[in-house]
Image (cartoon, rainbow, N blue to C red):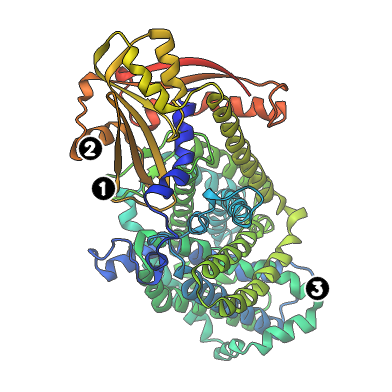
Amino acid sequence: MAGEEEDRSLAKGSKNGADERTDPSADDGQHNGGNDDNGKSHQSLPFLCLAALGIVYGDIGTSPIYALREAFYSHDGISVVPANIFGVLSLLFWSLIIVISIKYLAVVMRASNNGEGGIIALVALLNPWKTEKKSRRYILMLLGLFGAALLYGDGTITPAISVLSAIEGLEVATPAFKPYIVPITIAILIGLFLIQKRGTAAVGSLFGPVMMVWFVVLGLLGINGIIHHPSVFAAINPTYAISFFADNGLAGFLVLGTVFLVVTGGEALYADMGHFGLAPIRLAWFFLVLPALLLNYFGQGAMMLENADITQPFYQMAPDWALYPVVGLATLATVIASQAVISGVFSLTRQAVQLGQLPRLNIVQTSHESYGQVYIPFMNWILMFATIGLVLGFRSSSNLAAAYGVAVSMDMVITTILAFFVAYRWGWFPRTAGAIAVALLIVDLAFLGANMFKVPDGGWYPLLVAGVIFFIMGTWRRGRELVGRQLQSDTEPLDEFIESLDQLPMRIDGTAVFMTEATSKTPPMLLHHLRHNRVLHEQVILLTVNTLDVPRVPAADRLKIDDLGHGVYRVQVYYGFMQASNVPVALRFAGEFGLEVDLDQTTVYVGRESLIPTSEVPGMMVWREHMFAFMALNATRATSYYRIPPERVVELGIQIEI
């Protein structure tokens, strides 16, 4: 395994680094996301609104293809009669208003981590890295990490259900297309995953305009349906929703599981806040997305009032001449929605790696202009095979809808809980925050309860994926702790070691860099090197790469250098969890802080530990130790992850029992 010691420094970064440099809890005001556009002020507001349409609203914008249909045709006992149509439309309307407009856009998105959003940002705002296990904040951290793991299941279901539902529109044109629906869907998904390595910069410029056309078409289709029954707008009255529950009992409650499909893109609003800022996301929602969605849903309801026998209300709103263009546009929109989710999984994975929750992976930056555009080959292929497997296994969007929603609804519950504790920690009117949290939790738990009935029909899948990812995170985190404990058990105080350097007969020219965590102990790799080679460079740098629990660290705060004497320097490099680590750049930058480093005369020493699982060392069950050793062996090498030129690297081998 390459570089386990410097890899541990990454996890320690948000502890040690936050202590010495930036603690996001120290200045509550800097995290009030309502006024933080995260450096996007140089771009025009209309441009950001257009871009937000393509990235943020893809998932929620494609829900009209299948959401209302599933509310009626996936449940026994819910007949297509006016009372039920008005009741379901009322539920759709108030779900969009309460969950999206109020919960996310008005409440949760106020909690930003220097402009960044998402569940990882919420965890970071609680600053749990310096807390003891079993403390409240540590438990909340685990809850947040499980919420992040849930998004991986969503990352495979969304492309499958979105593209499949779009292609199913061909079946409305003619039943002859039915045998080709699944093959066409798989072909599109394969193409989508194959182009990921090229990045989204080229096609990304088209996302916004295409989605703007999509939302305009949604509104026009809805108007075409509403013309037949303008009285459908009476469903805005919440009494129709209440009557629906009263008339249908348990069957009415279960419909919430499919009504929830209209808000499944809610987490994307929060997670992508750092890309565009809060204002563009809000403006795009209230001035285009929400009106278009409501018009379309109410238009579908009006068509069902006109003809209770229709089974594809979305496509059957379109005139015959427009059916194929609508299917084509829907396919483009679902591909864009899938692309946004895939990119979100890549971003989430990078954050988890940066925070030490997953093994190092090969992360490819696909754009020099946009840091958020990355490609992770391993995750790409995992997502592709999982998504294709879902299409082959479920074979229709209706079947996939049975698996969709469980993970997202659970994630929304976790988001509400974490957001409340963030508000409480910042002193945002605790009683008011508590009352709002309780009200939102009632809604979230109702959706979660309805979705839990989907578990036997496919809802188990995202829970299984989340459980596996969460278990991998826990095993990796615990294994690194054990390795660190074993390495530190055979070392000595750093100050004593530095004093002993006077006894060395000679020092050779050049600089030696040892990557380590910032402790008062001598780095094990340094001792190992000196014991075996009996020589040391004139200049020794103990380099720690710290990932703080903030998205980005300014260049002015990037380095901290301490002269420890006898030619030994401690250099701490600070990155945010949205930034990539680059050791050569950091060493060159050290000259700006008074420490000259000639990279041509520099050798970087990294650890090459061989892990030996054994029952004699307490900490983990042996089978988990074997699992950790396998992950460590297959993790991306430190030289690649930290962008270190291989010709400047010397690996030091050591065996460690865990």
Residue at the image point whose x is 54% and y is 66% from the top: 419
Q: Which residue corresponds to mark 2?
A: 589
In this rendering, which labeled residue sits more in front, label 1 or label 3? 1
Identify residue type, mark 1. Answer: Ala
Against 564, is 367 above or below? below
Q: Which residue corresponds to mark 3?
A: 250
Q: Where is residue 342 drawn, in percent x and y?
A: 48, 49
Residue at the image point whose x is 44% and y is 18% from the top: 527
Identify residue type, mark 2. Answer: Phe
Whichever of callouts 2 and 3 sits on the residue coming sooner in the sequence is 3
Q: Do the residues labelled 1 and 2 touch (CB within 8 Å)?
A: yes
Q: In this view, does 256 lie to the left or right of 156?
A: right
Q: Where is residue 140 drawn, in percent x and y?
A: 61, 56
Distance of label 1 from label 3 (alpha carbons): 58 Å
Against 375, is 370 above or below? below
Q: Quadrant of residue 94?
A: bottom right
Whichever of callouts 1 and 2 sits on the residue coming sooner in the sequence is 1
| Local SS, label 2 | helix
Q: Which of 239 and 148 is in front in this view?
A: 148
| Local SS, label 3 | helix
Against 602, is 425 above or below? below
